[in-house]
Image: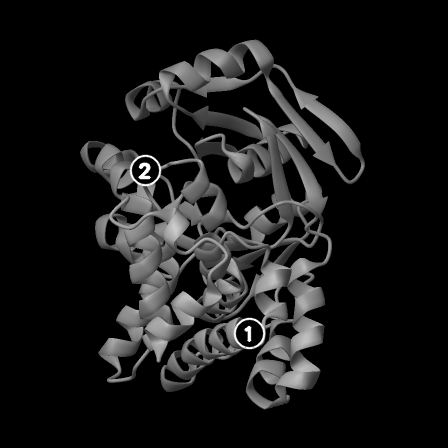
Amino acid sequence: MRILIFGAGAIGTYIGGSLALAGEDVTFLERTDVAKELTKSGLKLGLPAGEQSVSDLCLVTSLDEAFSKGSYDLSILAVKSFDTASVLNMMKPLLDKMPPVLCFQNGVENEPAIAAMLGEDHVIRGTVTTSIGRRGLGNIKVERFRGTGIDLNHPLSPSIMEACNRAGLGMLGYSDGQAMKWSKMMTNLMGNASSAILNWQPGKVYAHPGMFDLERRQLLEVLNVMAARNIPVVNLPGTPVRLLAMAIRYLPAFICRPILVKAVGGGRGAKMPSFHIDLYQGRGQSEVDWLNGAVVRAAEKLNLHAPVNRLLTDTLLKLTTGEWKKEEFDNQPEKILAMLS
């Protein structure tokens, strides 16, 4: 397959690099400065089978340049959700040339935005549950292999799945793409915003009784939206999301909390969640509005309430923009809990 990858971040490097190693014809679209560096360094992938490198990279810095090299069977989008709008603006003049987009982004609002521009037949829902660590530009390490998922409701899905499994990506197919994406979003939310706000490891968040209750309410709000929309919870590659949902709904805190402390903290080491990384690297942008904020918007459409997701969204956005100082919430769970009561 001829595949165009938007961005060589951690996921783009992992997916695109793995496909290239398996013999697929992969082109990366990146900024000029990044492309220049990657031309020199190539890609380095720490995979379960060992260290691999991709030196003969095909890199372009614009869609015009990409399409000057021919047409593509597939494009893959794995950029942060706050970059989706700029990618869509890039596509706008060349819609007739765009191949279907496999969207590996987190959240549930990217695919509708892509479909609004390209059409439903040009969007394929995907997910990545394998944990990827970024060691540098174009340099990643698989920290915990779980796999990837794809919505089967597209004619290209079987051939994509075959290519991805040849590349060692452990791809499973899902008959309900919405269920796959919403179930993945549940796992993305766990300890993410709270960790950034409090400057705590996720395990510490879940070990705190008050914060555990807040986290539980956050996930119950997601489950309530899913139930109202008849979206089932599904297990993801290497991730028993249905068991998580049952624990959140039915187990008493004294049983559920120790289990989830281990689940959110196990195998992470010192690595912080994505919201914390973006906040403390001073990106000035956060995906919280595409995750927690998406829950709030979905709840509003159903006349449901999502106060915890709203609080986490509003607080983290204000910390991200600098309207509020990070130090005001650093190691202060009582402050965020008081704002909810």
Q: Secondary structure at mark 1?
A: helix
The x, y position of residue 307, in whole percent, is: 32, 76
Decide which of tag 1 and tag 2 comes sooner along the chain: 2
Relative to 26, is 278 above or below? below
Q: Which residue is mark 1?
A: 212
The x, y position of residue 120, in whole percent, is: 31, 57
Q: Do the numbered discs 1 and 2 sit on residues whose CB atoms are within 8 Å?
A: no
Q: CA distance from mark 1 to mark 2?
A: 45 Å
Amino acid type at mark 1: Phe
Q: Give the residue displayed 64% in from the left and 88% down from the top.
A: 251
Amino acid type at mark 2: Met
- For the residue carrying disc 2, how many other residues have a C-alpha within 10 Å: few (<14), some (14-19), or many (20+)? some
In front: 127, or 63?
127
Q: Give the residue displayed 70% in from the left and 84% down from the top.
A: 255
In front: 134, or 18?
134
Q: Give the residue displayed 48% in from the left and 25% down from the top.
A: 27
Do we see residue 109 in this rendering? Answer: no
Horizontal arrangement in the rendering, residue 329 relative to residue 261 (left or right): left
Q: Quadrant of residue 270?
A: top right
**If the image is split into quadrants, where does the C terminus sit?**
bottom left
Q: Quadrant of residue 334?
A: bottom left
Q: Quadrant of residue 90?
A: top left
Q: Secondary structure at mark 2?
A: loop
**If the image is split into quadrants, where does the N terminus sit?**
top right
Q: Which residue is mark 2?
A: 98
In front: 137, or 274?
274
The x, y position of residue 101, in whole percent, is: 40, 45
Relative to 144, is 138 above or below? above
- Rendered image coloring scheme: one colour
